[in-house]
């Protein structure tokens, strides 16, 4: 469904992406792993068209992502942001229904609220949460609201940017389970960027490791532990010694 071929992106002298080739099949969950600063977020922004690659191509269903109707293109995506990225001045239901209250997806206010309440229910939050403000919620609840917002418009493709950052292990497990259930239920294509191996094992169908600007390894999640690739083995086991240099 999404194909990247020879994607390069530099910022001044910093060569972040150096020829990324990656295929994300329709209806599968692809998780991109790699250390901090390896370009995972830049890769995601390139797919969304928020950052234009210096060269190479990125296609969605065979169509270049940099061409065509941007609104129609972005309407196919949902996004769970790393920090939640909720609007402090909006109530929870208004955050969830943000896309349904404006633009090409606009719905009547009452309908948008009803959809928001249903999506909140789907992520385990009660209807009374809808009229609260983000500051009144715990970190785990905020993450659930972000997930509800990501699925509110029934997107075909959902991106998850470090979905468990800042959460304790129990809440991380809850969020991982919700993500997996929702992606399967919706039949969505998913792309997650993370360095949390518990998330990888919980939500991935396939895994790709980004290192030094290229995809170092890709394969099914069941193949990850058995691969002899030294970069993958060092990363997934958190070893200090190996081909990936650590800052000391």
Image: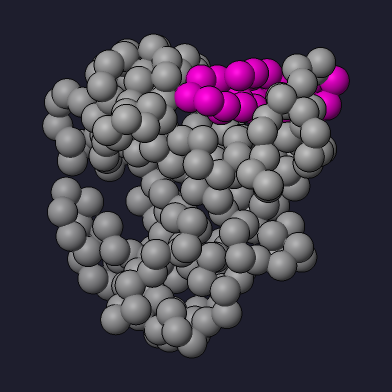
Q: Nearer the viewer, residue 239 or 156?
A: 239
Colour scheme of the rendered structure: one colour
* Residue 222: % across, % down: 79, 25
- Residue 52 makes an appearance in the image: yes
- Residue 148 makes an appearance in the image: no
Quarter-of-image position of residue 11? top left
Where is 130 relative to 178, above or below? Answer: below
Q: Classify residue 181 as left or right of residue 161.
A: right
Which residue corresponds to the image point at 47% horizontal and 63% vertical from the top-left? 83
Check the picture and name the quadrant holding the N terminus: top left
* Residue 29: % across, % down: 58, 32
- The stretch of residues the image draws in magenta is 206-226
- Extreme-front residue of the structure: 248
Which residue corresponds to the image point at 44% horizontal and 41% vertical from the top-left? 41
Q: Nearer the viewer, residue 5 or 67?
A: 5
Q: Nearer the viewer, residue 116 or 62?
A: 62
* Residue 85: % across, % down: 39, 64
Where is 58 relative to 242, above or below? Answer: above
Where is 228 relative to 72, above or below? Answer: above
Where is 187 relative to 136, above or below? Answer: above
Which residue corresponds to the image point at 27% horizontal and 16% vertical from the top-left? 55
Numbered-mark total? 0
Q: Is residue 45 magenta?
A: no
Q: Classify residue 234 as left or right of residue 200.
A: right
Q: Classify residue 170 as left or right of residue 123.
A: right
* Residue 151: % across, % down: 44, 52
What type of secondary structure mainly makes up the magenta span?
A: strand
Q: Is residue 217 magenta?
A: yes
- Extreme-right residue of the structure: 226
Which residue corresponds to the image point at 57% horizontal and 53% vertical from the top-left? 163
């Amino acid at each position: 469904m999404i194909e990247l071929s020879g994607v390069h992106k530099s910022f001044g002298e910093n060569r972040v992406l150096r020829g990324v080739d990656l295929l994300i099949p329709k209806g599968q969950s692809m998780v991109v792993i790699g250390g901090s600063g390896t370009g995972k977020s830049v890769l995601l922004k390139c797919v969304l068209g928020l950052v234009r690659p210096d060269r190479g191509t990125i296609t969605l269903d065979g169509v270049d992502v940099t061409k065509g109707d941007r609104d129609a293109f972005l309407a196919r995506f949902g996004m769970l942001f790393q920090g939640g990225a909720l609007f402090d001045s909006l109530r929870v239901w208004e955050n969830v229904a943000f896309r349904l209250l404006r633009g090409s997806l606009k719905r009547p206010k009452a309908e948008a609220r009803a959809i928001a309440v249903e999506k909140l229910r789907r992520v385990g939050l009660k209807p009374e949460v809808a009229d609260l403000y983000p500051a009144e919620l715990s970190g785990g609840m905020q993450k659930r609201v972000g997930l509800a917002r990501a699925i509110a418009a029934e997107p075909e493709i959902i991106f998850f940017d470090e979905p468990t950052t800042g959460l304790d292990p129990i809440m991380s497990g809850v969020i991982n389970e919700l993500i997996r259930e929702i992606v399967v239920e919706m039949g969505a294509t998913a792309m997650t960027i993370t360095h949390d191996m518990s998330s990888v094992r919980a939500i991935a169908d396939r895994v790709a490791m980004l290192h030094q600007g290229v995809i170092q390894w890709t394969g099914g999640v069941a193949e990850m532990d058995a691969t002899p690739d030294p970069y993958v083995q060092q990363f997934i086991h958190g070893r200090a010694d190996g081909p990936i240099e650590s800052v000391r």
